[in-house]
Amino acid sequence: MTDFTPTERTQVHRLPKRGVYDREAVYRILDEGLVCHVGFVADGKPLVIPTGYGRKGDMLYVHGSPGSRMLRALGKGADVCITVTLVDGLVLARSAFHHSMNYRSVVIFGKATMLEDPAAKREALRVFTEHVAPGRWQEVRQPSEKELQATTVLAIPLEEVSAKVRTGPPIDDEKDYALPVWAGVLPLKLTPQPPLPDDRLPKEIAVPEYVRGYTRKRR
Ligand SMILES: Cc1cc2nc3c(=O)[nH]c(=O)nc-3n(C[C@H](O)[C@H](O)[C@H](O)COP(=O)(O)OP(=O)(O)OC[C@H]3O[C@@H](n4cnc5c(N)ncnc54)[C@H](O)[C@@H]3O)c2cc1C
């Protein structure tokens, strides 16, 4: 698996030490994330739209209604910039200036391709569903032909990609270490709460293992 090569667009300039181009590391971030933000220009105006996604190999998939402005613009070949952000902690420094966050984030540049082949669309929807809840696809009713037609699926190749990662404690000005102010990191984590069965669920259907043991850590 070859690493990403920084391009003019993906070279991290601000704090370049935090730039990551290791493909495995980037994919671990993408696989842990749930939501991406899709940036594009439609009718001459910039827009950033949050949405779900899935990844298989070197391809990212987004999907939705054919009426979605985002999917229509991307399907016509608009340039796209997609970000995924994981917040790992609040970095509380002794000065307001040096507050920060610990994070892992990914920026992707490219152009999307609209999937037309029903088998390819179905596979992308499987990838999307398994990204959200691994184990779900094999249990649920599969999409009908009509549902497939009513779903636009776009594939974005993972070619021009960067990640940026901040870890560790606050970095204060030397003189500020003497201040009587609590400083450190407040770790944050996305943690599932107890599942809430649907009101119309027959009592005998148990909560599946992949729901009971749900975690975003994939590897
Ligand atoms: C949760 C979170 C909170 C942040 N808070 C702040 C803040 O308050 N103020 C602030 O200035 N910055 C913050 N950042 C960092 C911010 O994302 C940018 O990296 C930073 O502002 C520099 O922007 P730039 O356009 O000058 O980057 P440049 O280094 O010029 O960007 C060049 C290229 O580097 C890559 N790149 C830059 N940033 C990222 C990134 N975060 N993830 C992946 N690739 C990247 C992209 O490919 C980009 O095109 C935060 C990041 C995260 C994830």
Image: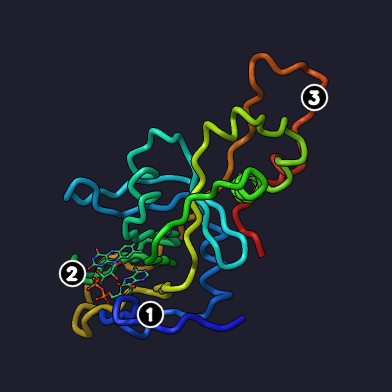
At x 71% / y 46%, what residue is drawn? 213
> Amino acid under label 2?
Phe
Tell me which label, 1 or 3, sits earlier in the chain. Answer: 1
At x 60% / y 46%, what residue is drawn? 121
Tell me which label, 1 or 2, sits earlier in the chain. Answer: 1
In the figure, is residue 38 to the left or right of 93?
right
Tell me which label, 3 or 2, sits earlier in the chain. Answer: 2
Q: Are marks 1 and 3 in contact (CB under 8 Å)?
A: no
Residue 165 seen anywhere in this rendered image of the structure: no
User: What residue is disc 2 on?
Assistant: 97
At x 61% / y 60%, what residue is drawn? 56
User: What residue is disc 1 on?
Assistant: 18
In the rendered image, residue 139, in percent from the top left (x then y), is placed at 77, 36
Is the residue indicated by label 1 positioned so its CB lies within 8 Å of ligand 1?
yes
User: What residue is disc 3 on?
Assistant: 205
In the figure, is residue 176 to the left or right of 15?
left
Label 2 CA crowd tier, 10 Å (few <14, some 14–19, many 20+):
few
Camera-near label (1 vs 2) is 1
Quadrant of the image where one finds ligand 1 = bottom left
The front one of 184 and 133 is: 133
The front one of 17 and 11 is: 11
